[in-house]
Image (spheres, rainbow, N blue to C red):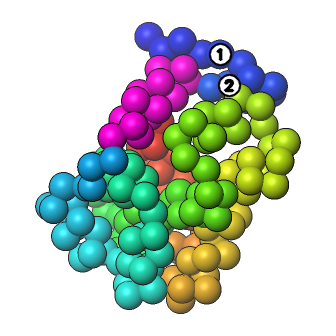
Amino acid sequence: MRMIRWIGHLPVAVAHLAARFFTSLSPRPPRTIDEVWAEDHLERGELELWRQLSNQDRRHSALVARRFVARRPSATRDEVAGALLHDVGKIRCELGTFGRSVATLVGPRTPRFRAYHDHEEIGADLVAAAGSSPATIELVAGAGPAFADLKASDHA
């Protein structure tokens, strides 16, 4: 059973946030098998964006994308790319693990915290500029028919 805590008007799964925090502390890169898998599902511009993510974020991205494919076996390449790039907008907030934790708790009170909270919109702009398909852009923006599966995969 998950404990749900309310911060402002949003319910937050405390167990999910705690697990994400502790796995974000390790700077190790993703497994080679995950790197190769991501490379197989991303176009050149998308791959350049994905490589800008921190090691922690690339590990998280690959984990979420693999869960997404397990939930949605018929996922298209564009949807898998969207799953891999779902947090790419966070590169613009320039916050580490502790800064992101504070931003989650206090909300968009500073420009960097605002960028963290707006990462879906920022990410959609980044993948659009990289030449991604409309389906990939839509999923990164937090919308579209595959978004429920992505959200479930991200919060598993």
80 up-or-down from 30: above or below:
below
Q: Which mark is residue 60?
A: none
Identify the residue under disc 2: 11
> How far separated are the C-alphas under marks 1 and 2?
6 Å
Whether residues under marks 1 and 2 lie with C-beta atoms below 8 angstroms apart, the answer is yes
Question: Residue 37 sits in which quadrant?
Answer: bottom left
Q: Name the secondary structure under disc 2.
A: strand
Which residue is drawn at the image coordinates 27% and 55% (left, top)?
29
Q: Is residue 6 magenta?
A: no
Which residue is drawn at the image coordinates 71% and 29% (left, top)?
105
Q: Is residue 14 magenta?
A: yes
| Stretch in magenta | 13-26
| Residue 1 seen | yes
> Whole-percent x and y of residue 46?
44, 79
Mark positioned earlier in the residue sequence (1 or 2): 1
Q: Name the secondary structure under disc 1.
A: strand
87 up-or-down from 105: above or below:
below
| Residue 61 seen | no
Q: Is residue 110 left or right of residue 121?
A: right
Identify the residue under disc 1: 5
> Whole-percent x and y of residue 125?
67, 75
Q: Is residue 22 left or right of residue 134?
A: left
Three-letter residue code for mark 1: Arg
